[in-house]
Amino acid sequence: MGETELIYPAYTDSFRCIGSVCEDTCCQGWTIPIDQAIIQKYKNLPASPLHQLIDASIQLTPECADNSKPTICAHIQMNASRQCPLLSEDRLCRIQREYGEAFLPPTCATYPRIVYSIGNHEEQALALSCPEAARLVLLNPVLLNPVLLDPTLLSPSSRTIQEPLCDAPREGNRVEDSRSPQAWFWSIRKSVIGMIQNRAYPLWQRVFLVGVFCRQLEAIAQGECGSLTIPAYVGDFEAAVASGAPQAALDTLPVERALQLDLVLRLAGMLLHRSNLHPRFVECVRAFTSGIGNGPGATLESLTANYTLAHDRFYAPFFERHPHILENYLINAIFLSQFPFGREGMRLGASSSMAHEYALLTAQFALMKGLLIGVAGFHREAFSSEHVVHTVQSASKHFDHHRDFLSDAHALLVERQMDDARGAAILLRNTGSMSEKAA
């Protein structure tokens, strides 16, 4: 079997830390876990002031007493400023400077790369909570290039993923296999990313179509579609999208800006009511609230009018000129979450709700889009890629600090009966004009 062309986040190879010139620090506010292997390395270090500082900065957990467990058993205790005490005055890591990268905790050694496995194949995506990673992902007009991979990497003996690597079952495959979505991960991901990049449709329609795609895949997996198989449906859906056939139905979906803004405000409020607000995120939220005219006497009606104005006059024109930015944001999110199955859903024997994973992606994107609309309203004609990077990075960092945010956001959508196709349309659509490609 030869090589096959697959969509793969090779852009992570281009990331380089810019160190002390970075406008933020990855060594503030985090919980930095340490495993047994690193603890042992620290124990074997020669006596020195840095060794003493390391010992004073590490807080052990009871699991560390059992050396047979290769587990996370300690973390670095942040100082009063919630920064890592092992930083030098120029905000560089003293451990890496004096002992080398091999002595870094795994999180520090890999961040902002997020490493995960698909069968025997290892991938990396980038956490946009790092400013330089956010710039690299968002501002690259050609984020993805075709990459050739050896398909033997994708057929592990563990059968974590049973990927036929073609668009029809090979001879001898059971029919049940052709209805298992995880078995067709690579084809499904390629189709999803192809939809996100299809500029024949406005972006909100592309994201909405991904939801239609995921819900139908789930119905096939649950045996609700007769003899229809995953590869047959993927091919049919791609052909329908390419023909433009769905566009007439998409044009009838609701535009309800007040409901959208209400959800954005509630989602933002869920983050603001939590602890450990980072100053950069506070700055972002202040720009957002000012940009939509939030203040004494403001009503949902007045806020919606300002929100609409900010979208139409400042946000939409900018993203019409730079359509790749939000596409890249979504593509990186798809890689990070192993969409549409999720990290847990990719495990052997695990079940996965693609509708649930889509709702999480939609909530995250709707909040980020809403924040950007307000920030665009604040900066007006001066709104730039620098403001986009600042907003995405600071909000992403706040997401990462509160890992239950997305599940809470999904619960809010369920509570408001917005976790269905109608809810997705309300969250995604901002204009009734077919000329709008950025909304």
Image (cartoon, grey):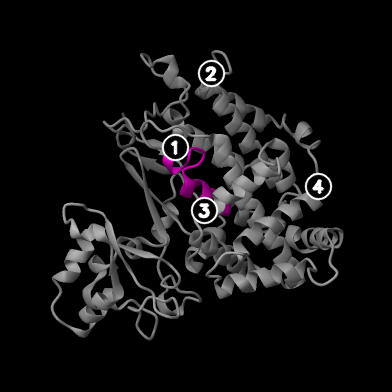
The residue carrying pointer 2 sits among few (fewer than 14), some (14 to 19) or many (20 or more) residues within 10 Å by Cα, namely few
Q: Nearer the viewer, mark 3 or mark 2?
A: 3
Question: Circle 1 is placed at which residue position?
Answer: 345
The residue carrying pointer 1 sits among few (fewer than 14), some (14 to 19) or many (20 or more) residues within 10 Å by Cα, namely some
Residue 436 on image: x %, y %: 77, 49
Task: Specify the amino acid type for callout 4.
Answer: Glu
Magenta stretch: dominant SS?
helix
The residue carrying pointer 4 sits among few (fewer than 14), some (14 to 19) or many (20 or more) residues within 10 Å by Cα, namely some
The Cα atoms of the two marked residues, 1 and 3, are separated by: 17 Å
Mark 1 and mark 3 lie on one chain; the one further toward the N terminus is 1
Residue 430 on image: x %, y %: 77, 50
Badge 2 element:
loop
Relative to residue 71, is residue 289 drawn left or right? right
In this orientation, which residue lies closer to the viewer: 88 or 353?
A: 353
Q: Is residue 173 above or below residue 328?
A: above
Mark 4 and mark 2 lie on one chain; the one further toward the N terminus is 2
Badge 3 element:
loop
The reply to whether the C-beta atoms of the residues labelled 1 and 4 are less than 8 Å apart is no
Badge 1 element:
helix
Choose top left, top right, bottom left or bottom right for residue 264.
bottom right
Q: State which region is magenta.
A: 329-344
The numbered disc on residue 413 is none
Question: Circle 3 is placed at which residue position?
Answer: 404
Badge 4 element:
loop
Q: Is residue 283 above or below residue 265?
A: below
Question: Circle 4 is placed at which residue position?
Answer: 256
Task: Specify the amino acid type for callout 3.
Answer: Asp
